[in-house]
């Protein structure tokens, strides 16, 4: 499963979640998480005006806080390795991804 995000993507192969982020002017960074290591997920659907996000929560850590500025529109910071902003057109794919990952959780 693939979800195209804002400056990145998320893929899930049934066991591993791979988040790839490409910041402007930098090389792409890849973060891999085992689905069994994830304790929770968060999905904020995007609207036509603001991007949403997909976020994964790991045991013993709290989720990154949402920024409240007009530029970020209530999303975690770009530096958070366990989240990715998504555009409105990716809402359905993100919901399917989250459902598949939640089925793989222990």
Image (tube, rainbow, N blue to C red):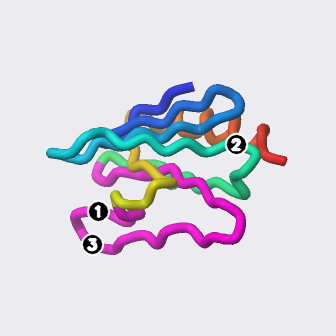
Judging depth in this view, the residue of 77 and 59 nearest the camera is: 59
Q: Position of residue 60 (x, y in %)?
A: 69, 71
Asked if labels 2 and 1 touch by Cβ distance under 8 angstroms, the answer is no
Tell which tag, 1 or 2, sits nearer the viewer: 2
Q: Residue at x 78, y 45 (%)?
A: 105
Mark 1 and mark 2 lie on one chain; the one further toward the N terminus is: 2
Badge number at residue 35? 2
Q: Main secondary structure of the magenta part?
A: loop
Q: Which residue is mark 1?
A: 72
Tag 2 secondary structure: helix
Q: Residues within 10 Å of mark 3 (few under 14, many from 20)?
A: few
Asked if labels 3 and 1 touch by Cβ distance under 8 angstroms, the answer is yes
Q: Quadrant of the N terminus?
A: top right
Magenta stretch holds residue 57: yes
Q: Residue at x 34, y 74 (%)?
A: 68
Q: Position of residue 65 (x, y in %)?
A: 46, 72
Tell which tag, 2 or 3, sits nearer the viewer: 2
Q: Residues within 10 Å of mark 1 (few under 14, many from 20)?
A: some
Q: Residue at x 66, y 60 (%)?
A: 58
> Is 34 left or right of 64, judged from the image as shown?
right
48 over 68 or under it: above or below: above
Measured Cα–Cα span from mark 1 to mark 2: 27 Å
Q: Which residue is mark 3?
A: 69
Judging depth in this view, the residue of 97 and 15 nearest the camera is: 15
Measured Cα–Cα span from mark 1 to mark 3: 6 Å
Q: Position of residue 99 (x, y in %)?
A: 69, 39
Tag 1 secondary structure: loop
Chain part drawn in magenta: 49-77
Judging depth in this view, the residue of 81 and 91 nearest the camera is: 81
């Amino acid at each position: 499963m693939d979800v195209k995000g804002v400056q990145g993507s998320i893929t899930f192969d049934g066991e591993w979640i791979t988040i790839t982020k490409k910041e402007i002017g930098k090389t792409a960074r890849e973060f891999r998480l085992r689905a069994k290591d994830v304790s929770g997920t968060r999905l904020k659907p995007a609207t036509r005006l603001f991007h949403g996000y997909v976020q994964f929560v790991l045991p013993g850590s709290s989720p990154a806080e949402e920024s409240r500025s007009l530029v970020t529109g209530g999303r975690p910071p770009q530096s958070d390795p366990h989240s990715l902003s998504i555009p409105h057109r990716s809402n359905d794919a993100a919901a399917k991804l989250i459902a598949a990952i939640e089925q793989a959780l222990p």
